[in-house]
Amino acid sequence: MTLLFESLFNGVAIGSVLLMAALGLAVVFGLMGVINLAHGELIMLGAYTTYVVQNIFKLEALKPCFGAYIFVAVLVAFMVSAIAGLVLERSVIRRLYGRPLATLLATWGVSLILQQFVRTTPMAYASGLWMTLLLGLLMPVLLPQRIRARFRALHLRVAGWALALAGGIGTAAWLSGISRLSRASARNVDVTAPKWMRGGIELGSLNVPVPRLFIICLTVVAVIAIYWFLNRSVWGIRIRAVTQNREISDCLGIPTQTVDALTFGIGSGLAGVAGVAVSLLGSVGPNVGGDYIVGSFMVVVLGGVGKLVGTVVASFGIGLLTDVIGAGRLLEVWPSMPPTCAAVVEFFATTSMAKVLIFALIVAFLQLRPAGLFPRKGRMVEA
Amino acid sequence: MDSHKPEGIRLLGRVLPWLLIVVLAIAAPYALPSFRLNLLGRFLSLGVVALGVDLIWGFTGLLSLGQGIFFALGGYGAAMHLQLTCATCSRSAGGIPEFFGLYGVKQLPFFWWPFHSPWFTLVAIWFIPGLVAGLLGYLVFRNRIRGVYFSILTQAALLVFYNFFNGQQKLINGTNGLKTDVTRLFGQMVGSDIMQRNFFWLTVLCVVVAWWICRNLVRGRFGDALVAIRDDEARLRFTGFNPTALKTIVFAVAGALAGVGGALYTVQSGIVSPQFMSVPFSIEMVIWVAVGGRATLLGAIFGALGINYAKSLVSEALPYLWLFIQGGLFIVVVTALPDGLVGWWKKGGVPRLLARFRGAPRLATYPALELEGPDKPRITLKGDQQ
């Protein structure tokens, strides 16, 4: 019984990280048909953001509420990755709609640039750059109507970006005071969890680590939020309309370009939230995104592209299987297994071999159901 | 165009490039320092791989992100043979390669046995990768898995192989890979200058042969069918062809080419390791072809040579810069140069560029303008309103 619960919990924990990483991809790939190989690097940005926020909260003034930094980090990480995604969409991906293979190659280029950017740029300057972008993009929205009406658009825009630049430089200068953020380094950094998050909770005979629980909760909240957003909110309905038929949506007055940018921004933002989860699990480095990207694509494909339910089921399924195979659970359940079977189970009972078997199983499964677990209903034209 | 020229010049035009290649290939080992020669040889063997990528991506439209599998399989084949000949010639570790001793393995794993034979190895370095590619391709194509799904699946397959090779110390020395440069072949150290020179000539020969095979493949009806798959697969199927078989064949050929390239690369770089199957390396192969020119065979070879030379030069001078440049290349090639450099050249890119510098007026193509003259009011298009 304990074994069952332990396995179940581990599986759900692994699955929730996968789901968190794949959720943004399910939006971007499933709804827009864009292959974003830079998704892993957006996760990485989220993880680094957690580190920066944590360091800011170590300053004297904010020390008392250090325990709450993780919640601030979730919000900031969402915004950091969302803005990175917005810039990416407006500059590169916008030109490539309808050419998924081209988006694949271009976003791979972006991911290389982002990795190297993190290696060579001090985090303080990167934060400054991000602040500039944030202020510059928000300025037209933030300024009151009275001021906007009085000046010419061009002047306003120039002044807005100048202000944003000043804000960015200010942020960079302020953060340069924190020694850990002032120098560039290709080495991994470690995020320390706040005090309340260390250790574990006793549930019956099971010791549950709190960070894992936090990630599971984060995932549940994120899934519910995105589900509500896509199915209930006005913009979500517009997004789905554009997904189904772009021309007709355009005719009905839906601003399709805004919808594209919004969808991509939200997908990227979810990657940032995944980054917070990832930073709690291990050290954060420039290559951290690469560990998640292929896995999350497999989750989306296995679940059925364009189906949120499929993504959820697939990631928990993969998580459970990973635990069952990787920890050699079958041997514990059934110790008197014939020796040949036992040898096979032991052969796959490591993390990397479990991955081998699971990917092989997924490829085999797609032989039977090429459209994944939850294929889209109705006849579709072959893309 | 050629028909206007006299017979002699045409013949010269045909023979001259080959003469040039032969002269350059023979002269290169004497003109270049051994380090540069080694690099050139390695990059040429990557050119063989690029030819395969061009066949499947440039002509057939299948973007495989798993060519590293076949590349590494070829490399491992060559390295296993060399390790075995070395072990048997020295008799130091009981007739099995030395690294097995580290993990307490006393008996050679069964799949190493055939690699004692040089003939088997010579066949295996292209046949095994080709076979694996054919099997993988058949399974995927049979279900009409296409486009990006194919790319993602090949990438997953790459990770399967990578993790497998990485984790199996007792079978193939895991992460450490197999070294070849201190092994012996024909009584010579593989890493020695004289052997490296021979390998260089062998590589040049292989590039030329591979190019010739690919050219013949893409020129006939087979090539037409491949291009048809790329441009409209459903239509090809409706006209009675079987795209599955065609795609499987071409994928197997590309796999075999990658295997040959991998074997040549391994003997010249001195080691084969699971890093050959890393995700970035397999995607890099695509950019060689993309920069050189999709669906142009020479473009693939030159792309592989050019990008890798640029990489080694930039990395020597400014190591942190290369990834920025490579990333930028991906974006620029996809958005601005979809035909690659050779394609751009062939489609008259140079005259167009020159014309732009000279400020030549753009040709007006409004039919109304030509029919009625410039004075008459013409239909305004959407873009003309301002």
Image (cartoon, grey):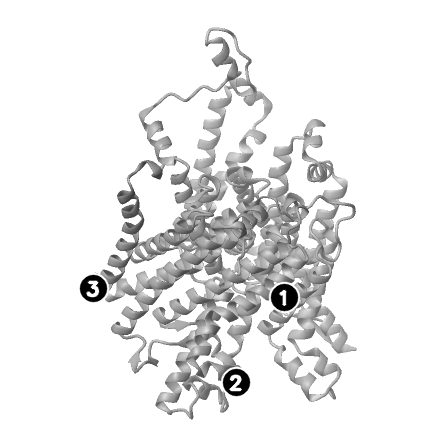
Residue name at image x 36 percent, y 36 percent: B1
Foreground label between 1 and 3: 3
Relative height, residue A327 to residue A363 (above, below): below
Q: Nearer the viewer, residue A34 or B187?
A: B187
- The residue labelled by disc 1 is A359
Q: Above or below — where is A348 with respect to A154? A: below
Does residue A121 appear in this view?
Answer: no
The residue beneath circle 2 is B109
Q: Residue furthest front?
A: B7
Give amino acid for label 1.
Answer: Phe
Q: In which quarter of the image is the C terminus of chain A?
A: top right
In the rendered structure, the answer to whether residue B251 lies left or right of residue B285 reads right
Is disc 3 surrounded by few (<14), some (14 to 19) or many (20+) residues within 10 Å? Answer: few
Near mark 1 (Cα within 10 A), the count class, few <14, some 14-19 or many ≥20, is many
**A305 or B192: nearer the viewer:** B192
Circle 2: residue type:
Pro
Q: Mark 3 and mark 2 in contact (Cβ < 8 Å)?
A: no
Q: Where is residue A109 in the image (x, y as percent from the top left)?
A: 47, 49
Chain to which the residue tagged by mark 1 belongs: A
Task: Determine the residue positioned at 72% across, 27% down.
Answer: A252
| Residue B376 % position (x, y) | 50, 6
Residue at disc 3, secondary structure:
helix
Separation (CA) of disc 2 from disc 3: 42 Å
Q: Which of A92 and A381 is in front in this view?
A: A381
Q: Residue B384: give its label.
A: none
Residue at image position (44%, 51%) is B289
From mark 2 to mark 1, how far is it between C-alphas?
25 Å
Rounded to the nearest angstrom, the CA distance separating label 1 from label 3 is 49 Å
